[in-house]
Image: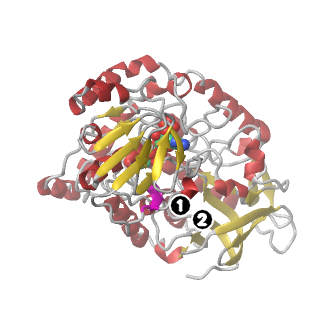
Amino acid sequence: MTLPGHVDHLIVGAGFARLCAAIKLAEDGETDVVVIERAGEVGGTWRDNTYPGACCDVPSQLYSFSFARNPEWTSSYSPQPEIQDYLRSVARAYGVTDKTVFDTELEHAAWDDEGQVWRCRTSAGEVVAKTLISGTGGLSEPRLPDLDGLATFRGPLFHSARWDHSVDLVGKRIAVIGTGASAIQIVPELQQVAGHLDVYQRTAPWVIPRNDRRYPTLERAALRRVPALAKLYRTGIYWAHEGYVPAFTWQPRLGAPAERGALMNLRKGIKDPVLRAKATPHFRLGCKRVLRSNTYYPALASSNVELVTEQIARVSADSIVTGDGVEHPVDVIVVATGFYTTELPIAERIVGRAGRSLAEEWAAGGMSAYKGTTVHGFPNLFTIVGPNTGQGHTSVVFMIESQIAYVRDAIRTMREQGYAAVEPRADAQRRWNANLQRRMRRTVWNTGGCSSWYLDAQGRNTVLWPKSTFTFRRGLARFDTQAYDLQVARPTPEREPVA
Ligand code: N01
């Protein structure tokens, strides 16, 4: 479709969060909805991350919409192509593909307080929207490491989320920089094809076993025919994962049994005590994202792999030089160093009521929102996967569905009560975040002895939700008008309410 000039609801991006928004608004009879997607197809992070071994580390039964369960998953942890197919088919089945303007990027969005609308500039032209539904989630903008000489490297160099499939890796000397969730999936795959593989580790991660299994045809047929069975699987997995919450948010010592399991995984995978010592983590489990793999440690122990723990001093045209002066020749560099998670590039493009961007608003105190979903000074902006809505133990899709329920109720309320604009009050947002940050003090993320992408430059955790996910869902079950400044339409041509 082509970009219209006016729309009720403009949704930016077409990953899990934004697909859910488009589907649920349509269910409520909101017909004037347009999605803009900067790429040529839906999928978000699952479209972008095509690296070898890309796989979900949350069980598939839970990593899918509650209203579009998928009995066709082939295994308990789905590989990226299956998740991408799932998202494509959901987008098609629910008519979202037809509402999406592809290859179109949001360049700038400014709140017009007179007109009570968002005036948006996109790469495909201008559009005026009554509400702007955006994802501010932090796993979409790759972060390259700030390494001396990186730009001088002459061979292929790419980020894990921008895999260059045209590069032939067979027999090559490959370097992987980073040992996070992406790297530990990539390393076992590259080990099988590389002539030599150097893995550059800054911090050894916790890696627990991944209890993956394939679903036999009979089991898939049962899941297809008996929806209650699929629901039961989902519920069981949900509560099993929720069991991590006390250890992560309240009493980190409760994670000790999981730490013992991870150390057994390490002993099983690596026999050499010197290598094992290098790969042993020195912080509490959960402080960084807990990784799951049965193949990472055996890959590190392979004869063609070296785990390099000396820090990188510089990169030259054809090598990586470490702090001890050793030059490691390399043909291909894979950078698995994560994403911009707390300084989101999209925040610079969204300008609120006072003429300040989200990035400016958040520069001093870090990212913050009310219930992770609305922001004082930014009327009618809904941030899905917004500040403090992430979690390190379960499916983000659960949080997304909770947020979308809140957005739906907000839009319903606007329609029914004739409000043209809703904006959380400053005091409500302040209280919400003060409570969050108080809760954050005793979490493993703050006390576990590590630095992570959950923390911003000031050491504030503005990414994760510090309680159970059902508490989040309960808190967002209803749009709480008492926390909002509610504006009726002003008498100008563009000031009708959302209706
Ligand atoms: O990124 P990361 P990721 N020099 O930030 C290292 C999700 N995900 O892409 O630990 C050297 O976790 C850094 O070292 P350190 C998931 O939520 C999900 O792997 O900071 N090294 C670290 O080892 C995950 O948490 C799935 O000391 C440098 C690594 O790079 C998130 O994406 C799969 C460096 C970065 O790890 C991000 O994971 C994959 C430098 N200058 C990812 N800078 C699922 O299955 C950074 N590092 C759902």
Query: Dot 2: within a 10 Å radius of its alpha carbon, few (fewer than 14), some, or many (20 or more) residues?
Result: many
Tell me which segment is drawn in magenta: 155-163
Answer above or below: position of 442 versus 476. above
Label annotation for residue 11: 2
Q: Which residue is drawn at 25% across and 60% down?
A: 72
Q: Residue furthest left?
A: 218
Q: Mark 1 highlights which residue?
A: 18
Q: How far apart are marks 1 and 2 (CA)?
A: 6 Å
Label annotation for residue 372: none
Specify whether residue 186 is painted magenta.
no
* Image quadrant in which the C terminus is located: bottom right
Specify whether residue 159 is painted magenta.
yes
* Contact check, label 1 and label 2, Cβ < 8 Å: yes
Q: Which residue is drawn at 26% across and 54% down?
A: 227
Q: Residue at x 56, y 58 (%)?
A: 152
How many badges with numbers are in the image? 2
Kindly state the secondary structure of the residue where label 2 is placed: strand
